[in-house]
Amino acid sequence: MVRALAALPVKLLWSDARADEFPDSLDRRVQVDQSDAVEIARDARPGGAAVVMTHSHALDFAITEAALAREDLAYVGLIGSRTKRRRFERWFTARGGNAALLDHLVCPIGNFGIDDKRPEVIAALVTTEVLQAFERRKQSGLDAAKERQEEGAVS
């Protein structure tokens, strides 16, 4: 996933508290952070993306909850099956999470109807989803700016 995203014109932060998970060499555009991933999600840049895929369902859920609560990220994706999504939805709403925010969650990620579970294929599909989310956000921003400009011209 990191290799697929590192080739793009994005700022990429790879968070994992487990130091042994990082390779000896990384693309210079990849920033590594071993601090609390939930805090990183809370502090992410508005308009960014969170692709959540850890070694722990509990950690996945906590990071995803923090990312969704932001309401300003272009993409929040959680690796997993439809069953995992349903489990997350129940967990999230039981904790008082706003059910409407679940509409912004992509889970399973990379779901383009291609039944190929190879990591590099999933990475390509998720990268496509992230790029599409950034484009939608850019287009909605352009549309909002155009509307404001047109409103100004009318008044």
Image (tube, rainbow, N blue to C red):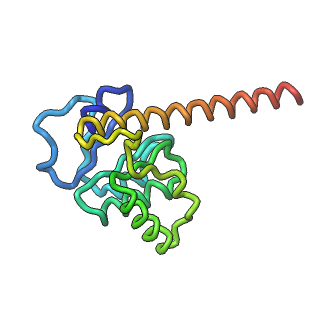
Q: Quadrant of residue 14?
A: top left
The percent position of residue 13, horizontal first and vertical second, equals 31, 41
Quadrant including the N terminus: top left
Residue at the spot 75% in from the left edge and 32% down from the top edge: 148
119 relative to 23 in the view: left or right: right
Q: Nearer the viewer, residue 126 or 50?
A: 126
Residue at the spot 62% in from the left edge and 35% down from the top edge: 140
The percent position of residue 141, horizontal first and vertical second, equals 62, 33
86 relative to 21 in the view: left or right: right
Residue at the spot 10% in from the left edge and 37% down from the top edge: 24
113 relative to 35 in the view: left or right: right
Count up the numbered dots.
0
Q: Quadrant of residue 91?
A: bottom left
Q: Nearer the viewer, residue 71 or 1?
A: 1
Residue at the spot 52% in from the left edge and 67% down from the top edge: 97
Residue found at the very far right of the displayed protein: 155
Q: Quadrant of residue 42?
A: bottom left
The percent position of residue 4, horizontal first and vertical second, equals 28, 32
Residue 153, relative to residue 71: is it above or below?
above
Quadrant including the C terminus: top right
The percent position of residue 22, horizontal first and vertical second, equals 16, 43
Residue 8, relative to residue 122: is it above or below?
above
100 relative to 63 in the view: left or right: right
